[in-house]
Amino acid sequence: MSSLSVASPFGDLTAPGRFGKGGGVPTLVTIRERNDLQFYTLSVNAGRDAGVAEAVLSTTGLTLPSGTQAASKDGLAFIGTTPGQWLVAVQGEGRAQFDALRAPLAETATIVEQTDGKAVVEISGSRVRDTLAKGCMIDLHPRVFGPGDAATTPIALIDCLIWQINAGPTYVLAVPSSYAASFWSRLTSSAAEFGYEVAQPAG
């Protein structure tokens, strides 16, 4: 019997290497696929907002963000997308905490897995904001968008959830899997003038 393996939505596009501007110029942008994350949509059932927030706080120690913010701890992140809805990113030790939430949320929220529908990259470096500015519709200046901030916005006409995970700056971007190749092409084209490295995928 043959075994099945999980295929990356990016195919072989994320093979590690150095690309773009050369000539001894330092790498100013680093991109890597994040295939170590599982995603779920958490939606509040009508009128049960308080119950959901209380369950998340008591089980994980995290306060659910009320807007387009991300709250994260120990491999578990809640990213606000719309009122009463969050995208939950789970990895490593966060799995146990997320599984522990299922029972207390059974009557107050709906949880739907979204992992297969997401293509995810992490991008960092000194010219990452300049790279993203070529296709991103929001202002990523540190005065207005910093660690813990999140937004849903078109990037190169592709719907993208972006959140900043540290002051590096480092961003995680999630797009529909069906647009993975087009998104990768646009992202790497935008980074080429600075010189970019594709790092080993995480996971």
Image: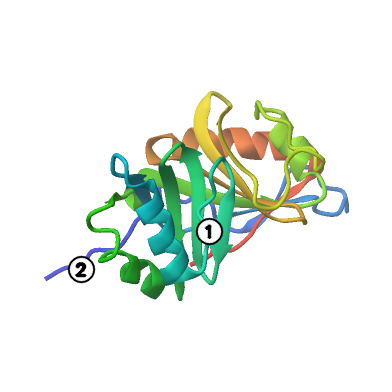
**Residue 59 in the figure: left or right of residue 143:** left
- Residue at x-position 50% and y-position 28%: 158
Would you name the residue on which mark 2 appears? Answer: 3
Mark 2 and 1 residues: CB-CB less than 8 Å, in contact? no
Q: Amino acid at mark 2?
A: Ser
Q: Residue at x 69, y 36 (%)?
A: 132
Q: Which numbered circle lies on residue 93? A: none
Structural crowding at the residue carrying mark 1, measured as other residues with C-alpha within 10 Å and reported as few (<14), some (14–19) or many (≥20): some
x, y (%) of residue 23?
A: 87, 48
Q: Residue furthest left?
A: 1
Residue 122 seen in render: yes
Quarter holding the N terminus is bottom left
Q: Position of residue 195 (x, y in %)?
A: 78, 46
Disc marking residue 63? 1
Residue lying at the far right of the rendered structure: 24
Could you say where residue 20 lies in the image, as x and y percent from the top left? 74, 43
In the drawing, does residue 65 fall left or right of residue 169? left
Q: Residue at 56% across / 67% down in the picture? A: 73
Return the x and y of residue 196 as percentages of the image width and height: 73, 49
The relative height of residue 200 versus residue 167 in the rendered view (above or below) is: below
**Secondary structure of residue under mark 1:** loop
Three-letter amino acid code at the position of disc 1: Thr
**Crowd tier of the residue under label 2, counting other residues whose Cα lies within 10 Å: few below 14, some 14–19, many 20 or above:** few
Type of colouring: rainbow
Which residue sits at x=62%, y=37%? 187
Q: Nearer the viewer, residue 86 or 141?
A: 86
Q: Is residue 140 above or below residue 195?
A: above
Position of residue 42 in the picture relative to residue 68 (left or right) = left
Q: Earlier in the sequence, mark 2 or mark 1?
A: 2
